[in-house]
Amino acid sequence: MNSVAASKPLKGWRILVPRGGPWGDSVAADLRARGATPVVAPMINFAPTDDPESLTVALAALENGEFDWLTVTSATTVDVMFSQDVKIPDRTRVAAVGETTAAALQAVGYRVDLVPAKENSARGMVSELTQLEPTPKRFLTLRSEIAKPLLSEGLAAAGHYVQSVVAYRTIGEPVAENIIADVQSGRINAILVTSGSVAEQVVEQFGDLPEATLVAAIGPRTAKDAVAFGLQVDVVSRHQTVSALLDSIVATVEAAQPQPSEF
C-alpha cells in the first residue's frame, strides 16, 4: 500500500453520518482525516417528553443534591440537560454508558466519574455500579421513552432507590430527497448506524439497500437492534465509540483490497 492510501484509507468513500450538531461535525472531521467524504444527514431528533413536569421536578431535585448518582445513557440526554442549563452538584457522581456519551458530557462541561470498563451497556453499568456501591444509594436515571428498563430494574434489584424519568422522545427526521436517491443508487458507500433508532429510520426511509452498501453498527447491541429491524450488518465495532467504529470500517476495507503479488 502506498503512503497516500495508508494515510487516507477511506479515500473515495462517501459515508452517511446519521446525526447532526456537534456530534455530526466531529464524526465528519474524523472521516475526512481518514480520506472519506462525509454526508451528514440527521435521521433522528429529540422531542420534549410528554411529561415535562416530572422532568422539571427531577432536575430540580438533582440540582438540590438529592441524588448520589446520575446515570446518562445517550448523548441526546446530554443535549436535554445542557438545553435546560442543568447544574450537577459536586456531591452527585455521574455515570456514562460509554465513551461516546462520556465525550458528549465533557464537551459541554459536565464531569464523568464512571464509564463501564468491560461492557458499554446498561448491563455493564449495573454490574460496575452495584460492585462500587454495596449499600443503598439514590440514583436518577434519565432516559428516552423507548429505552428498555434494564438499568433502573437492575439497580433497584440491588437495593438502590431509583427514580427513572423520561427526558425526551426520539423521533424520526426525514432526510432530503437527494440523499435518498444517493443511497438507493449506491452513491453512498457506507452508512453509520449508531443506535436502534437510526437503524429503524434507515429501513423506513431508504428501503432495501444496494448490496454493495456497507452497514456499520457501533457495538454489538446496536448491531443486534439493527438486525431486528431487518438490516444486514457488515461491520460491528467491538467498542461503542466512533473511533472504534471508523477503525473497524478501515479494517474491513483494507481486508477486502487485493494484496500485491510476491512475484
Image: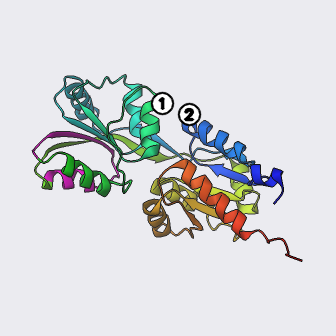
The answer to whether the residue labelled 1 contacts the one labelled 2, judged by CB atoms less than 8 Å apart, is: yes
> How far across and how far down the image is residue 191, in percent?
63, 56
Sort mark 1 into few (<14), some (14-19) or many (20+) by Cα contacts within 10 Å.
Answer: few
First reached walking from the N terminus: tag 1 or tag 2: 2
Asked if residue 182 shows in the view, the reply is yes
Q: Is residue 212 left or right of residue 62?
A: right
Question: Dot 2, how many residues are within 10 Å of its Cα: few (below 14), some (14-19), or many (20+)?
Answer: few
At which x and y percent is residue 34? Answer: 71, 48
Is disc 1 placed on a helix, strand or loop?
helix
Residue underneath mark 1: 107
Within the magenta stretch, is there residue 153? yes
Q: Is residue 203 above or below residue 43?
A: below
Q: How is the image coloured?
A: rainbow
Location of residue 20 (image quadrant): top right
Residue 104 lies, with reference to residue 128, above or below; the image says: above
The quadrant of the picture occupied by the C terminus is bottom right
What residue is disc 2 on?
22
Percent position (x, y) of residue 37? 74, 47
Residue lying furthest front: 263
- Magenta includes 189? no
What amino acid is found at the position of numbered circle 2 in the picture? Answer: Pro
Which of the 4 image quadrants contains residue 78?
top left
Q: Position of 234 compared to 116: left or right?
A: right
Q: Amino acid at mark 1?
A: Ala
Q: Please state which of residues 212 and 127 is positioned toward the viewer in this rendering.
A: 127
Range drawn in magenta: 135-156
Q: Is residue 12 visible?
A: no
> Quadrant of the rendered structure where residue 96 is?
top left
Front residue of 194/171: it is 194
Residue 210 sits above or below residue 158 on the image: below
